Image (cartoon, rainbow, N blue to C red):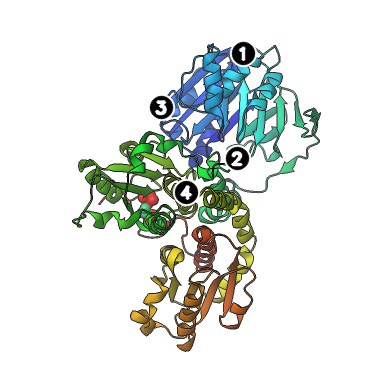
Amino acid sequence: MCGIVGYIGKNPALPILFSGLERLEYRGYDSFGFCVLDDGKIDFLCKEKGKISDQCHIKNSESSGSIGIAHTRWATTGIVTKENAHPHFDCNQEFFVVHNGIIENYKEIKEKLLNEGHKFSSETDTEVLAHLIEKYFDGVLEDAVKKALKEVRGTYGLAVVSPKDPNKIVVARMSSPLLIGINGDEFIIASDPSAIITRTRQIIHLDDNEVAVLTPDNFIISKQEKENDCWKIADKKIETIEWNIEEAEKGGYKHFMLKEIMQEPATIEDAIRGRLYLEKGNAKLGGLEIVEDRLRNIDNIALIGCGTAYYAAKVAEYMIEEYAGISAEPDIGSEFRYRKSSFNKNTAGIFVSQSGETADTLAALREMKEKGLLTIGVTNVVGSNQARETDAGVYTRSGPEIAVASTKAFIGQLTTFALIAVYLGRQRDMALVMGNRIIEEISRLPELAREILDTKEEIKTIANKYINYRDFWFIGRKYNYPIALEGALKLKEVSYVHAEGTAGGELKHGPLALIDENCPTIAICSSDSVYEKMISNIEEVKARNGKVIAIATKGNEDIKKIVDDVIYIPKTLEMLTPILSVIPLHLFAYYFADALGRDIDKPKNLAKSVTVE
Ligand code: M6R
């Protein structure tokens, strides 16, 4: 999500760090920072709010130090402030850390460190690392880093420098990418190849549980062995990056949209990290703690969003009504104001938005606030207007989404809503065993999502088969009705082909008039409580010579007898199927649009964030 660059060599580090960060800006851009060492002293230290590309003067600052680390941030823990920007440091400003990832147990560690007398200057999880390193430092930086890492739980790609052990950078990785670029007598570390590609194409990827120590002439990578806790030198291969800059930013994918779809399993992982209370059958949602008591008394919820975010709100309607027993009503941001809604003091509004800046959603939020009602945000961008103006909220932690078409952010919203439904349910009548069952199943979702992505070539073949059609219908029921709407929106948005989504039951109330051999239907018919009814809808389409592509549950061989093509998704709980069934629809839209040669990441007439009403 954020970006890291580090340099150690013979040249001034600052300009190299600066241009590395500029190229990482697409990963996060709310604040940035540098720490450069020279001759055992801090030569340049700076943390700022804003975009690095707006601060070109920094590149020309007086700094000749040849060892340094830098970071561009996409806020997750702690709002956007100068203090929360990286590098983070200890009490005496001697240990500097840049970090991507999340330290899940940072609150416990911070409390302990505060009791021991440490003074904190930010709200971030990362800062505990700097203080732990300070605590364990005994002359050798890497030893202190290893000791600190033993105490933390979570994910990290990190880099550390210190004037106390000045001729090195120590880096470590756990589930957050980090690589070392080798360029003769200089080494550049980065979270992403795009940061270093203009300087070198020779790289070594760090793996989980590895720590590397880089000095001006050498580097050593060691790996912690699980069995005995010992560190052994790791034998690593140098790879050559073949990508150009543009390809590197897209992780080697042709478009950001495809890259972001491929990130969907990781998006689920990020949304649930540290939030699953397996033994309590509950979700741990820190952002709702301050309104926990008010939420207990809520008896109806308005769910507001626009576009894809509105479809997430519609899925949430089914989840919250079924599992928390609270009446929930989704609405489109722009329509909300025209309604004379009968809210009472026990109404809460949940506002859903990737950007947190959508004007219509914000207008609805402000209207609800004026009525003095409880407002909750389900937002991706930390520190956005929505995040700041709601009373409480849950961040979806989906990372920057670059493509205009929202894909991974939608997955993050659905996953977050599954957690909220359990949380609200457990505040009410949901039994422990039910809570356990859902939480356990949520924890399997990343693996199930990966299974779907593994079939992407088959989905591409199916998309290519239908490339000459110009009208599509999408149908689904219950949890998958909003997914039919989302599938149609995604297809029209990126391919410019006409597509409509309806509830399966609505087909015969009008749309059937349009179904014939020229209008294929994509039917989401997972093996669940509405399966039989979806089969009836498919038969209605087939009776009009319509072609049908089914999204069905693995193991359902019978469906092949009645439809033209099948895309399988793994079995999961009915309430969680939308999180899986939408993945093939995202891929279908992508491959379809790509075959037509569309400008996928920037579809015509559309903007990523709609900040006007
Ligand atoms: O930033 P938001 O989630 O509030 O944006 C809402 C919609 O504008 C957005 O989802 C839009 O519909 C997407 N382009 C759909 O892919």
Q: Nearer the viewer, residue 595 or 363?
A: 363
Measured in 3D between alpha carbons, the distance from the residue under mark 2 to the one under mark 4, in whole angstroms, is 36 Å
Q: Nearer the viewer, residue 119 or 392?
A: 392
Amino acid bearing label 4: Val
Q: Nearer the viewer, residue 64 or 269?
A: 269
User: In this view of the protein, can residue 608 be seen by the observer?
Assistant: no
* Residue 369 in picture, x, y percent from top left: 24, 41
Q: Are marks 3 and 2 in contact (CB under 8 Å)?
A: no
Q: Are marks 4 and 1 in contact (CB under 8 Å)?
A: no
The residue indicated by pointer 2 is 192
* Residue 26 in picture, x, y percent from top left: 49, 42
Ligand 1 image position (quadrant): bottom left
| First in sequence: mark 4 vs mark 1 | 1
Amino acid bearing label 2: Asp
| First in sequence: mark 3 vs mark 4 | 3
- Labels 2, 4: front one: 4
| First in sequence: mark 3 vs mark 2 | 3
The residue indicated by pointer 4 is 422
Measured in 3D between alpha carbons, the distance from the residue under mark 3 to the one under mark 2, in whole angstroms, is 24 Å
Q: For label 3, count other residues whose C-alpha is less than 10 Å away and answer few (under 14), some (14-19) or many (20+).
A: some
Q: Residue at x 44, y 72 (%)?
A: 475
Q: Is residue 513 above or below residue 216?
A: below
Amino acid bearing label 1: Pro
The residue indicated by pointer 1 is 163
| First in sequence: mark 2 vs mark 4 | 2
Mark 2 secondary-structure assignment: loop
The residue indicated by pointer 3 is 81
